[in-house]
Each structure stands twice: as structure tokens, then as C-alpha cells.
Image (cartoon, rainbow, N blue to C red):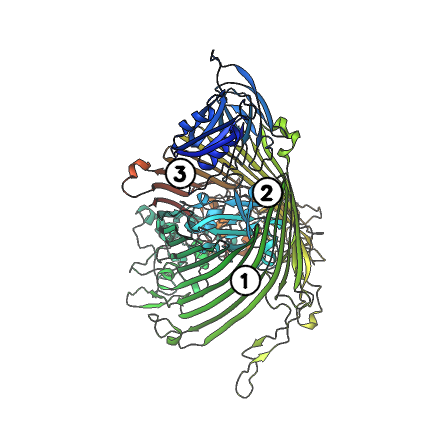
């Protein structure tokens, strides 16, 4: 059957399906007459060229008559009949015989696309049966069907058609492209590209993947959603409100300081991802390999994240949307200490083992018991026995305090509100969004807050048929209220102190004042605060000129401003003495100080590029050429001053102590030109070339410029004839490969300048003063130049079972060469360190897998399942460490990043005789006892030591595991039943080894005033517990001999987490009619609801690090929230 005339109608065409017909036909064949009617109306005719009487000439005229009257005149005296279907489709056929019987007959035909090209591998089946076939290389098909049966014609990327079998036996069918499939576009560098034609490794994230979740930033929402994008909580700040998360694409990219992070662009402008309002997002693309990222050049060596925000509506409908979310959060996990009786027992045992006086006297132990029996109603502290005017500390306390309950709230509140308007007026479309989010912190005794404000305005105006002007602007501000740190350190020390708070210490003394020892409660409440403000704003005017058919010229300019302010006030803290009227300074916060920091960043960039797209026959060409300029400048000032006159007015002006001032002025610029050439033949063979020529001011003249090319190709195998036998099962199969090089300029500024340090306070007094002086300049390398990332990527995209199941698999190998590394050592008499050189290399190998199943069971129920899996390992392939020293401060060739070196444990010493007979462990400690750790003599030299601590002689150490997260996976279930929707998202790590060497794991750290004991620490060796897990404890530094990095204490850091659960209900539209509401949806959403891990109790698998020791950081949050989506 053949389709006559165009099938694509304008979206604005409003002619009624019951429109009357006015035509004047003179001596035209029926074929010609059909075309005449099509031109004058919305009707489209379908028929076979084999039908009789099509060449019969007819003459007739109709004036404002119905289609039925028109067809009666047209077909009068012929053997043809017609049938009118929906959407103004009319089918011609042969009149049935008098018997009217329907017989099974052979149906043949050809299926072509809008360009008349055959569609290979299209599915042709009889609706409601298992009978079906596919088209051959010429688009032909053949099958047996009964007259009146319905043919289903489908192919990926095209709209499915249903055709009723009439008396004809030959059908010519034209399939129209499905704009939601074949024309699904992916945002890539400086434009978009059809997904079917992609040759690089690009992943996309839609708004549905991240919206309606109780997250406070976009980075959180991306965790686990796409393979290869690795996101973890901050290694320093953990889950603190407003803290940025750590992120990389495909593992560690570089060892150079400041390198290895992905390049984040929001509507083409560099911007912190955490400042983006999730509700403004239209699309996110992750460019993973060199081929896809090469167009961005100097800043894209380790992947690119492209965020596209919403733009104006395509129609003139004015829409208002409001989204609100109200959530309550609580820590996912907290480390619980034992009760005070178990604590004093364990601490005194540790003192016995160390041969020192008990920390808790028998009198204090009895008080502990009595206090527990009273329900913790006693004072919990006695006056200090060495200074009775003050309350006692540590061994003078006997309360029973659960410090996790004291320090952390049960529930903290967060909420967000977003309003947006979108529409179109004449030739202009617009989008405007306002966002507000507030998140409370988990800490008691301090009002932690994080607030973010967003304004987005995007506008596009078609000034002329050939000129379009756009103006994008964004404003974002974040405010954070944070506590100061204990004893003048930054606030991360607080979580170190919380981990060491004794359970015997009461929160308050008998007079109601806060306790001083090992407590930061008073520091949180009275010790001051830190306020941070970050403001970013940018404006981007741009234009697009349609020069010729297929040729467009684009240009844009961006001005971006980022302002940062920090005010930190350390206040004096007074501790109440035994006499309520007396007090003294807190031993840690016995000073006051004000610190102020202001910094402004200005960034400008301009792009000018031309894009030419042309399709001719089976060939398609897409060429892009352009250039970019960037300029960045930072100017900052930081000052501090002690001895404030009053803490009520903290400012530099009210302080009387010494003033410390420093400033920062830096700038850099880049210039680049780029080219991209894509060629496709028959959507079967695709080739792409990208090239970028970049120059950076961060390198000296002669080393500033580099050319970085990439190549990629793809092959749609399913379009070949040999694919026909398996096409009904494997519907599509595309192979991809790419290789390319990218330069990295994200290195420190001014490395090629011989800077002269200026110092103050010379040790000698000259003319009554200590003058300013200088030192010899640092050594520099004149040959420092680009670090390069070279990536080979091989991938495949597949779909199965009528495209319900799809799969994408990637394998890649990335080599980073010319990294900054140490030079050969220079003689110490020189007095200066050797400069950096481009002499180090890394290699990362990995794979990624995505599987997706989607199925519409019936009109009421549909569901989808998506699974992702990714893995990567990084190895050092070159590093200047000629002796192969093993250290966390250097690297060596062959080292796998994340390797954990340590001893292999052989249980405990069982007796003094066992100690004497075992290999000598005196290199670790001089004295060993029953219950201490025994290590295996791996090199059989009769002693346990670390040899030269080199790769060639590591002594008795070996690689025990690796702490790099491996086999990162995600699993999403989503579905919809009528007006209900649901989604369940699991995320986790399949393999990871963890060694936690801090108080949080071992409890005893060799300082009886700062140790702590958790429930698992009670399983320590003693005469009545020789099958214990932990060795005998010590209250002195001797304990370290049992806490060496060793196989016994390597933990399994793998985990499975219910990352998100969401249930929603959308009110039926008939209920909303008449009240002006288009959509109203309510939902419940939960984040981090369940976690399955084998780590020690209280340690979150995403929170095993910390600035002051392993697993000593701000806890992550479990969030439960309710929300509403409202559209007018």
C-alpha cells in the first residue's frame, strides 16, 4: 500500500476532520485526483498500485461538499471502495465478491521511510496473533493474512502503524519518524546529536530521574543513577549541611593537585553543580570518553557534565508550576559507646595491662554502679581532687551519658519551594524559575542551617526568519551557619572530640553549667560561629543565524561573577566552677578571635562557531568549526585579629591583638579553536573526528599550545541483511569505538615563575626592629607543559524483544601521561627542593553496563527496571621513585591506587613460651605478652619488620586489600498503575576493603584521657575471654603494636542501600476540570531508608573517612519527605 502526499502535518493546523471539500477535477486519473483532494484537504489516501481502475480518467466538481459525496463521484463506475479511518486516513480497496467470504491470502509489500528509502528489519505482524515477519534489505515483506485482519508495522525510531487488510494483496507503506525515539537527541558539545548516531560514550539523565527526591543538591541525585559517574560524601565534611560531595568520572584521573575532576557546565557556563536548582533542569549529559569531551579541550580531560536548564514553551500556553517538599531527616548511623560501667571496667583493664594507675578508683567505680541503679539521677561528677575549686574531669566523673543522643537531633527539618512559569508570546518563548531551599543540621546546641536561593530566566526570540536571539541568566546564593571548632581548629575537629566523649562525663555539672573535659557541647553553644555566603550570577546573550540551508552560525558571550564571604568568630568560653559565682576560661577556647575572608571570581568567555548539516541520499554530514576565549581572575583578602574587646560585637575594629593579613590575586586565560566532523551513511556507518587546539596561560611561552584530536566510529549492524534472521529477537545492535587525547590545564598557576618568598619577623633585630626579609626563589622547571589523557573506548548498544529490553556496555582504558611528578633529588646543600616535571603516568581500565526493561502491560499499568554496573582500577605506570619506597606520600610504578599494605595476622600469643618461640617482633615493640597480636614471618628471616619499606623489600608486609570502591551498581524499579506511580532505587558497592585505624574502631588509642569504648571493643582478650576478636588493650602508646595495619582488621566495605523510595498519586484530570488546575500530584519520598553492610556497627559505608581520623565525620542523613507538584 502506498501513502500519497506528506504525512507530517503542522502542529498549528486546525482544519476540522469534518471539513467540506471543494475541488474541480478535469480529465485526471484517479491517482491524480487523489493528490488533488489531498492538497485541498487534510485527508490522506492509502492504496496499492495494483488496484484496478487507478489509471481511469475522471471529471467531476464538488463545491463545499462532504468527503462522502466527493468519494462517491470519484469512484463511481469503478470496482473500488473506500474506508475512512481515524486521523483523516482513507483506505482504498476492491469490492468484495458476492459471497462476501474472507479468505487467507498472501500479503506482500514494501516499507519505506519519509525519504523513500527502504526500512530494513521492520516488524510486520498480525494483531492479536503470533504471525509475523520482518522486512528484507529492500524493505520488502510477505505473509499470509485474512481480509479484515489488522497489520502492525513497527520499527525502532518510527511511529507504529496499524493497517486493515482489504481485498488488495500489495501494500506500500511509509513509516514516519518517532520524534521521541529516532529523533531523541542528546546534548553534546556545542549542540545536540541524534542518539542513534552517537559514536562516543555519552550518558543522559532526565528530570524524572532526580526530581521529587528529598535531596538538597543535584550531585546527591546523580549518585548511582548512571554508571561511571562516581559520587561519594565529602571525605572531610561527611554529610554536613551544604558540604560538597566528591565526584569523578571513571575513577582517579590524575595525581596532580586540583586535577581529575569533571568539568561542569550549566547552559554552557562553568558553575558549581550544588548551586543548581534541581527543578530548573531539563537534561543532563555526561560525556565520558575523549571523543565526546574533546570539543571542550583544556578543561575536559576527565569528563564533562552538561546541564541544560528549561527553556520556553513550544506553544502559546502559559503555564505555572509549583513544587514543594517537606522533609525530616535523622542520621543514618551513629556510633554507640558502652554504658559507663563497661567503660570504666575496660579502661581500668587497659591501665592494668599498661602497668599504670587505674583511671577510675574503686570509689568512682562504686559511684558509677549507684548512678546506673538510680537511672542516671546522680550528679555524675565530684570536685577535682587536685584542684577542688573546679569540677573534676575524666576519672572524677561517673555519669552514664549516651553522647550520640546528646549531640545529634532525632529529626531535623528541611523544605524546598519552587515556582516556575513558562510560555510563548508571539515569536518569543520564555522560562522563569524561583527556588528556595532550607536545610537544618543534625547537631544539637547549635543552629546549623543551609539555605539556597535560585533565580533562572531563559528567553528566546526569533527576530527574523533567519535570526534568533537568546538571553539566559541565573542567580544563585547559598548561606551556611556553622559552628567553630574545638580549641581554635576548624569544625571537623568536633567530630573527633565527639567520638572520644567518655560516657562517664555528665553534660552539666551539679550547678547547671556545662562540663569541660572531652566535651564540645559548650563550644557548640557558646564558642562562636562561622557564616559563609556564596553568590553566583551570570548572563549569557547568544544568537543563531541561519545563513543558508543547513548552515548556522552561533555566538555567545558570558559574564560570570562569584562572590564568597566568610566570617568566623571564636568566642571565649567560661566554665563554671564548684562555686556557682566563680568560673575560669575553658582550657580549649580561652581566647577570642575574628576572621574575615572575602573573595571575588570573575569569569568571561566567548564562543563563535558555525555548524553545517546536510543530508543527500543515504549520506549525512554534520560539520562544526569554532573558537573560544576564556579569562578568569580571582581577588581575595583574608584577615584575622585576636583579643576582642567584647564577643557581642565581633569585628576587626573591636579587636586589640595582632593583625594577620593575606591576599590572593590570580588570573589565567585560554584560547582555543575546535572542529568536529560527523559523517553517516544510511544510518549504518558513522564516523566522527574532533579536534581542539588550545593554549593556556598556565604554561610558559613555547609550551602553552597543544593539539588534541579524537576519532570515533559506530556500526549499526542491525541494518544489514544478514541480521534479518535474529532481528525479531535482537532488534538493534550498534558497535562503537573511539580513541582520543585531551590536554589538562587544571594545574596550579605560575609554576614557571621563580617566586621570591617574602617573610616577616627576622630572628635578628636591626635598628631596633625585626625587618622584612626574603629568601632564595624556588626552583622551577622550564619544560612544564600539558598533562594528557588518552582514552580508548569500545562500546555496544543493543535492544531486544520489540525494543522492550535495551543494553549498553562499555570498556575503556585511559592513560594519563605527563603528569606532574618529583624530579631527581638535588644535593641537600642547595637548600631547595627539586622542581616538578612532566614525568608521571597512570592507567585506568574499567567497564560499564546498563540494562533497561520497559513494558506496558495494558492501558492502566506499565513498569520499567533499570540496572547499572561499573568498575575501574587505576595503576601507576610511571613515577620517579627509584628505590620503590612504600608510603602514602609517594607512589611507585605498578602500584594500584587504594592498595592496603600490612601484616598478616596469626592470631594471639597464647603464652610467654609462645612469645619466645615465635619470630622476633621487637622492631614493632620491645615487649610482647599473651593476648598480643602475632604476625606471620612472610620472608622467613626470623623477625617481623617492614624491611626497607620498599617494593623490592617490604619485609613481612604485603597487599592485604584495596579500598577503592569496586563494582558500583544501581537498580531502579519504576511503574505506574492508573493514577498511582512508584519507584524504588537501590545503590551500592560490590567490593571494597576498609581499614579503620582510629578510635571509632579500636577504641583504645594509647591515651587514657582520650580513648573510648564501643560495644564491639568489649570483645578484647583477657584471661576469661581468650577467643576474643581484639587484642589486650593498653592505656599507653604500647597499644599501637596490636593495631598495626593487618589482615585481621580489614573490613568488608561492600554495601547495599535503599537509596530512594517514592510513592505518588496524581488526581484524575476530570476532578480538576473547572478549577484551573492541569495537574496535581502528591507523593512520599524516602532517602537512604535501609543500608545493608558488614562494617562495624555505627559506621556508614559512605562515611569511612574523616579529617581527624577514619569514620570521624558528620553523619549522613536518612530523609523522609512529602511533596506536591502543582501545574496551572
Give the alpha-carbon distance from disc 3 to disc 1, as whole Å: 46 Å
Real-space CA distance between mark 2 and mark 1, rounded to the nearest whole angstrom: 29 Å
| Up/down of 1101 relative to 878, above or below | above
Q: Label 3 neighbourhood size at 10 Å, few (<14), some (14-19), many (20+)? A: few
Task: Answer with mark 2 or mark 1, whichever residue precedes in sequence.
Answer: 2
Task: Specify the farthest residue to the top.
Answer: 99
Residue indicated by mark 1: 606
Residue 691 coordinates in the image, percent (x, y): 65, 54
Q: Which mark is residue 15?
A: 3
* Residue 389 location (% of width, % of height): 34, 66
Residue 730 in the figure: left or right of residue 319? right
Instruction: Identify the disc placed on residue 80.
Output: none
For label 3, the SS is loop
Residue 376 location, x and y as percent? 32, 49
Residues tagged 2 and 3 counted as in contact (Cβ below 8 A): no
Dot 1: few (<14), some (14–19), or many (≥20) neighbours within 10 Å?
A: some
Q: Which residue is mark 2?
A: 197
On screen, residue 1097 above or below 272: above
Query: Vertical placement of 181 versus 778: above or below?
Result: above
Amino acid at each position: 500500500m502506498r501513502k500519497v502526499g506528506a504525512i507530517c502535518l503542522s502542529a498549528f493546523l486546525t482544519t476540522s476532520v469534518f471539513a467540506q471539500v471543494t475541488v474541480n477535477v478535469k480529465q485526471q486519473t484517479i491517482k491524480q485526483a487523489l493528490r488533488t483532494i489531498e492538497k485541498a484537504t487534510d485527508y490522506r489516501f492509502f492504496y496499492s498500485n495494483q488496484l484496478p481502475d487507478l489509471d481511469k480518467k475522471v471529471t467531476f466538481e464538488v463545491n463545499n461538499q462532504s468527503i462522502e459525496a466527493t468519494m462517491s463521484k470519484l469512484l463511481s463506475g469503478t470496482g473500488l471502495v473506500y474506508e475512512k479511518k481515524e486521523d483523516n486516513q482513507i483506505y482504498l480497496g476492491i469490492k468484495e465478491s458476492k459471497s462476501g467470504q474472507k479468505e487467507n491470502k498472501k500479503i506482500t509489500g514494501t516499507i519505506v521511510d519519509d525519504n523513500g528509502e527502504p526500512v530494513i528489519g521492520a516488524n510486520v505482524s498480525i494483531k492479536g496473533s503470533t504471525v509475523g515477519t520482518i522486512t528484507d534489505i529492500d524493505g520488502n515483506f510477505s505473509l499470509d493474512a485474512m481480509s479484515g485482519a489488522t497489520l502492525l508495522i513497527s520499527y525502532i525510531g518510527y511511529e507504529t502503524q496499524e493497517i486493515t487488510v482489504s481485498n488488495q494483496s500489495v501494500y506500500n507503506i511509509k513509516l514516519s519518524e518517532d520524534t521521541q525515539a529516532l529523533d531523541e537527541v542528546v546534548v553534546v558539545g556545542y549542540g545536540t546529536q541524534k542518539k542513534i548516531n552517537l559514536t562516543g560514550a555519552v550518558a543522559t539523565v532526565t528530570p524524572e530521574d532526580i526530581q521529587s527526591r528529598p535531596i538538597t543538591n543535584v550531585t546527591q541525585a546523580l549518585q548511582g543513577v548512571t554508571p561511571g559517574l562516581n559520587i561519594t560524601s565529602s571525605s572531610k565534611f561527611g554529610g554536613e549541611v551544604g558540604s560538597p560531595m566528591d565526584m569523578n568520572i571513571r575513577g582517579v584521573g590524575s595525581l596532580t593537585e586540583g586535577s581529575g575532576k569533571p568539568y561542569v557546565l550549566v547552559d554552557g557556563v562553568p558553575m558549581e553543580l550544588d548551586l543548581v536548582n534541581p527543578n530548573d533542569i531539563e537534561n543532563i549529559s555526561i560525556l565520558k570518553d575523549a571523543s565526546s569531551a574533546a570539543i571542550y579541550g583544556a578543561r575536559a580531560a576527565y569528563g564533562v557534565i552538561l546541564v541544560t536548564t528549561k527553556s520556553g514553551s513550544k506553544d502559546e500556553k502559559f503555564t505555572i508550576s509549583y513544587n514543594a517538599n517537606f522533609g525530616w531527616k535523622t542520621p543514618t548511623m551513629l556510633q554507640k559507646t558502652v554504658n559507663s560501667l563497661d567503660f570504666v571496667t575496660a579502661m581500668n583493664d587497659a591501665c592494668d595491662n599498661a602497668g599504670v594507675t587505674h583511671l577510675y578508683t574503686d570509689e568512682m567505680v562504686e559511684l558509677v554502679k549507684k548512678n546506673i541503679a538510680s537511672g542516671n539521677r546522680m550528679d555524675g561528677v565530684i570536685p577535682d581532687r587536685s584542684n577542688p575549686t573546679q569540677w573534676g574531669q575524666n576519672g572524677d566523673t561517673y555519669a552514664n551519658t549516651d553522647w550520640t543522643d546528646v549531640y545529634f537531633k532525632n529529626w531535623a527539618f528541611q523544605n524546598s519551594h519552587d515556582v516556575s512559569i513558562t510560555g510563548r508570546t508571539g515569536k518569543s518563548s520564555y522560562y522563569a524559575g524561583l527556588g528556595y531551599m532550607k536545610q537544618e543540621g543534625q547537631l544539637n546546641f547549635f543552629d546549623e542551617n543551609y539555605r539556597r536561593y535560585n533565580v533562572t530566566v531563559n528567553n528566546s526570540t526569533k527576530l527574523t526568519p533567519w535570526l534568533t536571539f537568546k538571553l539566559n541568566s541565573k542567580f544563585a546564593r547559598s548561606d551556611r551557619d556553622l559552628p567553630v571548632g574545638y580549641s581554635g581548629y576548624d569544625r571537623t575537629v568536633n567530630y573527633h572530640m565527639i567520638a572520644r566523649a567518655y560516657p562517664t562525663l555528665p553534660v552539666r555539672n551539679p550547678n547547671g553549667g556545662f562540663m569541660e573535659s572531652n566535651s564540645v557541647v559548650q563550644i557548640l553553644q557558646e564558642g562562636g560561629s562561622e557564616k559563609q555566603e556564596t553568590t553566583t550570577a551570570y548572563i549569557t546573550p547568544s544568537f543563531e543565524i541561519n545563513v543558508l540551508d543547513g548552515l548556522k552560525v552561533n555566538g555567545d558571550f558570558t559574564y560570570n561573577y562569584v562572590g564568597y564571604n566568610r566570617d568566623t568568630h571564636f568566642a571565649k568560653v567560661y566554665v563554671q566552677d564548684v562555686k556557682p559565682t566563680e568560673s575560669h576560661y575553658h582550657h580549649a577556647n580561652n581566647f577570642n578571635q575574628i576572621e574575615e575572608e572575602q573573595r571575588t571570581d570573575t569569569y568571561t568567555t566567548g564562543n563563535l562557531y558555525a555548524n553545517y548539516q546536510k543530508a543527500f541520499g543515504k549520506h549525512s554530514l554534520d560539520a562544526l568549526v569554532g573558537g573560544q576565549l576564556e579569562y578568569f581572575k580571582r581577588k581575595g583578602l583574608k584577615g584575622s585579629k585576636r583579643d576582642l574587646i567584647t564577643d557581642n560585637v565581633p569585628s576587626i575594629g573591636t579587636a586589640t591583638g595582632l593583625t594577620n593579613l593575606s591576599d590572593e590575586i590570580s588570573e589565567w586565560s585560554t584560547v582555543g579553536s575546535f572542529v568536529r566532523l560527523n559523517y553517516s551513511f544510511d544510518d549504518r556507518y558513522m564516523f566522527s573526528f574532533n579536534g581542539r587546539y588550545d593554549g593556556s596561560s598556565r604554561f610558559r611561552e613555547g609550551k602553552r599550545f597543544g593539539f588534541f584530536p579524537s576519532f570515533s566510529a559506530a556500526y549499526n549492524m542491525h541494518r544489514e541483511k544478514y541480521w534479518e534472521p535474529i532481528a525479531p529477537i535482537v532488534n538493534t545492535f550498534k558497535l562503537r569505538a573511539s580513541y582520543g587525547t585531551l590536554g589538562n590545564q587544571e594545574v596550579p598557576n605560575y609554576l614557571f615563575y621563580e617566586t621570591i618568598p617574602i617573610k616577616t619577623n627576622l630572628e635578628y633585630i636591626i635598628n631596633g626592629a625585626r625587618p622584612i626579609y626574603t629568601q632564595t626563589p624556588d626552583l622551577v622547571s622550564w619544560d612544564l607543559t600539558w598533562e594528557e589523557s588518552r582514552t580508548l573506548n569500545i562500546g555496544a548498544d543493543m535492544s531486544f524483544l520489540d525494543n522492550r529490553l535495551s543494553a549498553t556496555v562499555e570498556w575503556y582504558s585511559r592513560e594519563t601521561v605527563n603528569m606532574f611528578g618529583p624530579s631527581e633529588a638535588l644535593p641537600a646543600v642547595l637548600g631547595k627542593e627539586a622542581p616538578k616535571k612532566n614525568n608521571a603516568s597512570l592507567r585506568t581500565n574499567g567497564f560499564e553496563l546498563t540494562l533497561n526493561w520497559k513494558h506496558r502491560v495494558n492501558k492502566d499499568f506499565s513498569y520499567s527496571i533499570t540496572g547499572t554496573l561499573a568498575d575501574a582500577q587505576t595503576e601507576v605506570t610511571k613515577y620517579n621513585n627509584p628505590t620503590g619506597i612504600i608510603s602514602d606520600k609517594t607512589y611507585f610504578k605498578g602500584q594500584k591506587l587504594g592498595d592496603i599494605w600490612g601484616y598478616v595476622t596469626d592470631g594471639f600469643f597464647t603464652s610467654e613460651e609462645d612469645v619466645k618461640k615465635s619470630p622476633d617482633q621487637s622492631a614493632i615493640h620491645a615487649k610482647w605478652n599473651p593476648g598480643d597480636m602475632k604476625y606471620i614471618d612472610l620472608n622467613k628471616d626470623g623477625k617481623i619488620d617492614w624491611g626497607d619499606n620498599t617494593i623490592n623489600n617490604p619485609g613481612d608486609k604485603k597487599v592485604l586489600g584495596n579500598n577503592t570502591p569496586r563494582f558500583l551498581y544501581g537498580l531502579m524499579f519504576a511503574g505506574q498503575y492508573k493514577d498511582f506511580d512508584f519507584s524504588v532505587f537501590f545503590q551500592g558497592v560490590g567490593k571494597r576493603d576498609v581499614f579503620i585505624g582510629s578510635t571509632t574502631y579500636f577504641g583504645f588509642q594509647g591515651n587514657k584521657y582520650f580513648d573510648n569504648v564501643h560495644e564491639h571493643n568489649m570483645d578484647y582478650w583477657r584471661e576469661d575471654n581468650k577467643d576474643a576478636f581484639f587484642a589486650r588493650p593498653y592505656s599507653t602508646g604500647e597499644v599501637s603494636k596490636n593495631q598495626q595495619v593487618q589482615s585481621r582488621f580489614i573490613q568488608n566495605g561492600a554495601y547495599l542501600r535503599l537509596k530512594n523510595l517514592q510513592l505518588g498519586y496524581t488526581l484524575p484530570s476530570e476532578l480538576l476540570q473547572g478549577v484551573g488546575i492541569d495537574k496535581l500530584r502528591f507523593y512520599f519520598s524516602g532517602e537512604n531508608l535501609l543500608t545493608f553492610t558488614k562494617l562495624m556497627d555505627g559506621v556508614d559505608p559512605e562515611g569511612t573517612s574523616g579529617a581527624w581520623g577514619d569514620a570521624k565525620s558528620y553523619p549522613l542523613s536518612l530523609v523522609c519527605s512529602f511533596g506536591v507538584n502543582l501545574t496551572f
